[in-house]
Amino acid sequence: MGRSSFMSRSVAHMVHLREWIRRRLSLSTWNGWPDRAYQQDRYQHRLLAEQEHLADALDHAPGGPVRIISLCAGDGRDLIKVLGSHPRRGDVSACLIEQDLRSVADGTRRAESAGLSNAVEYLAADATAYATYRDIVPADLVLLCGVWGHVPVSDRNELVRALASICKAGGLVIWTRGVRKGMIRLRQIQSLFAAPLWQQVRANLTPDKNWAIVTHRYCGPPAELPASGQIFHFRTGAGTS
């Protein structure tokens, strides 16, 4: 083996190793995150606003089955709380995608306690990979809550394109964005959901003005889901600068 080939393989190995370490550290950071976060008022405000948008979406959903997909779902308390008492609970089948196994276990227990074992399914997988969605799309409603702050700017357009392939034509996406450091952050994301493919249904701020919660409708034609590839890179805090 030539020296240049050896060096190339060594560099590739180091890059892979750094990425593996970064992912492990990130998973450790998010272990048990919901229990810690929701002790804070600002996250409680966001949770209540998410639940309001979700309940409204279900109130106005057409008759028949309702498919929900939640990306980076945590312990699912936003969705499970609403479904527990909503009249449309019998129509819903929800797939919650989450890598942190503690959150998956906690969310599964929450669903069981709410009598939603047949409606709520956890998928312990990588929400950033197209392959994860192969057997679960399309959705009537997609939840993307608490995610944008960890999506690098360079990946945001691809994430919105992916949402078009995860959603049904006419489906909804509910998303959140931190705005404590300025409304420009909200405007940047809103601009990605451009007409005529997307229509903003509703948007509001939490009472403490820390978060924006927005619902968009996908108005474009059915979009094919790529078989493989990366939708975005989840990097803690990458979208907050």
Image (cartoon, helix red, strand yellow):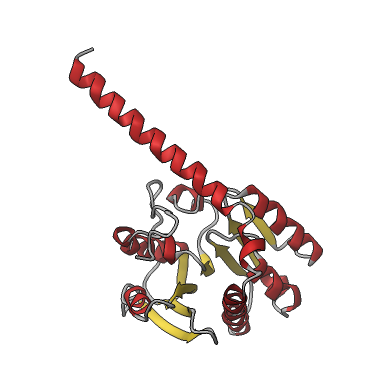
* Direction from residue 173 to residue 37 in the image, left or right: right
Q: Position of residue 156 (x, y in %)?
A: 34, 63
Q: Position of residue 99 (x, y in %)?
A: 57, 49
Q: Position of residue 177 (x, y in %)?
A: 45, 73
* Direction from residue 12 to residue 111 in the image, left or right: right
Question: Looking at the image, how many numbered discs can be counted on the residues?
Answer: 0
Name which quarter of the figure residue 15 lies in: top left
Residue closest to the eye, 86 or 7: 7
Q: Position of residue 197 (x, y in %)?
A: 34, 75
Q: Is residue 170 visible?
A: no
Q: Quadrant of the C terminus?
A: bottom left
Name which quarter of the figure residue 88 lies in: bottom right
Q: Is residue 59 visible?
A: yes
Residue closest to the eye, 18 or 8: 18
Tell me which residue sits at (67%, 62%) in the image.
Answer: 35
Tell me which residue sits at (24%, 26%) in the image.
Answer: 8
Tell me which residue sits at (55%, 51%) in the image.
Answer: 29
Q: Quadrant of the N terminus?
A: top left
Q: Outermost residue toward the top?
A: 1
